[in-house]
Amino acid sequence: MADKEWQGPLEQIDEYRWRIPRSYRDDMRTDCIVYGSETLVQQMRKDNALEQLVNVATLPGIVGNALVMPDAHWGYGFPIGGVAAFDAVEGIISPGGVGYDINCGVRLLRTDLTKDDVLPKIETLVNQLFHAVPSGTGSEGVLKLSDSELEEVAHDGAEWALRKGMGMETDAARMEANGRLPSDPSYISKRARERGRPQIGTLGSGNHFLEVQVVDTVYDEKIARAFGIEQVGQITVMVHCGSRGFGHQVCTDFLEVMQRAVQKYGISLPDRQLACCPVASEEAAQYLKSMNCAANYAWANRQVIIHNVRRAFERVFGKSSEALGMRMVYDVAHNIAKFEEYEIDGVKRKVIVHRKGATRAFGPGNPEINEVYRGVGQPVIVPGDMGTYSYLLAGTQTAEQQSFGSTCHGAGRQLSRHAALKRAKGSDLIKSLKDQGIVLKAREHRTVAEEAPYAYKDVSEVVDSCHGAGIAVKVARLRPIGVVKG
DNA sequence: ATGTCC
């Protein structure tokens, strides 16, 4: 991942913002803006993230600036941590700007339990969670969807699981887009369907995880209370996962479609991985419908997982999940493209915003936010790495003005998987986490080594950069005490 | 991220 160091211009705008001017390369159509502290930006200079950002700035119909968030690093075509908006009529759409794991995202539950209730039972709880939520590459769930059920999942998203009794009535209002985007499964390949059918309710591998956490610090009491976070010591549950093999196959299938579209529409690209098509084309319509199917699959997946998490807590604590207060805080998508409206240079424009490793962060009053949170801003959930912290933030009007209503999505890798593997063994990491009061159970020890805390940037510095830049406000910090990994 | 190469 460490390639050649960035040699181009990077002008500091203020403490947490930097600019690569359009004049840097003839093919750029707009400026690039880089968010992050000096330390984080220095890290970004060492992989190809900034060159990739410049490539994004060359794409047809780009509106406003091409952006990267403070946790950005190299990705497929577009940098992970990238945000780019394209005109809804004259712009393009690109699967590489969404990512392979369509609607990879994060969901947070609050509980009435405290650290004192949970610590004596944490080993049992983590074991129960490990068995309730299958994890690892290729893992299959208890449910095996039929062809028609898979279509229902792709069409209805989280609502499918709620209809089957897998959730609380109040869950739906606490998800981005209510856990369902308008979709049509007509263009989903047979292979994608076959990969999707057995995988519903599974966590996957890599940086995906399920965590039992303790509220460690509250930064904004008013917003925290609105989100259901009342006190330090309170227990939360976080799940980070996506659309599994289903979304991966949808992305793979449409990258091929887009390679042909690049020829057909005569689009010139600085990197083949930016394959895209005009947003007004038939290919775009088919990708968007299919991407939304995968997004819906991911919301249903997280809904089934959380249903099984609630059942596990019920078994361990001998009370219903309602009695344990296991209500949703929110569910965010951090790999997705969506049509939204922004005022650019005084003109209102409809754009398709690509967020790839970036979280929507709408501010107070935005009509797109469900009314339960409209007064305080949208909850933003930022998973860190195992062994440190995760954060709960809130969106801002500054984000809507500056960053197409977007903020960071996590810590961001700083070591390649290969480099991380050389540093320590998974079993030693599990022991050292245990010494720090974190019980971890994983399907594969190799994944633990690849995902070690030192493989990631400092999530606190990422979050502080977003807070400092005004594109999110800090609400609470969450510390893991139990982790399930792939 | 991913039946980590159909």
Image (tube, coloured by chain):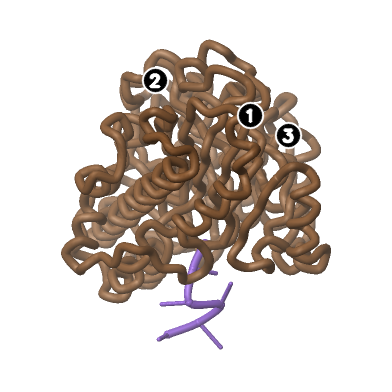
Q: Nearer the viewer, residue A485 or A372?
A: A485
Q: Is residue A391 above or below residue A306?
A: above
Q: Is residue A278 above or below residue A426?
A: above
Q: Is residue A3 visible?
A: no
From the viewer's perspective, is A273 left or right of A263?
right
Q: How many marks?
A: 3
From the viewer's perspective, is A304 left or right of A362?
left
Say which residue appears at 40% left-offset and 30% top-offset.
A327
Say which residue appears at 52% left-offset and 11% top-offset.
A222
Q: Chain of mark 1?
A: A
The residue most toward the top is: A222
Position in image of residue A151 (x %, y %): 20, 60
Q: Which chain is brown?
A: A
Position in image of residue A384 (x %, y %): 64, 42
From the viewer's perspective, is A69 left or right of A303?
right
The three-letter code of the residue at mark 1 reads: Asp
- Whichever of labels 2 and 1 marks the residue nearer the N terminus, that label is 1
Q: Nearer the viewer, residue A474 or A330?
A: A330
Say which residue appears at 38% left-offset and 61% top-offset.
A247
The three-letter code of the residue at mark 2 reads: Tyr
Q: Which chain is purple?
A: B
What is the secondary structure assignment of the residue under circle 1?
Answer: helix
Residue highlighted by disc 1: A116
**Foreground: disc 2 or disc 1:** 1
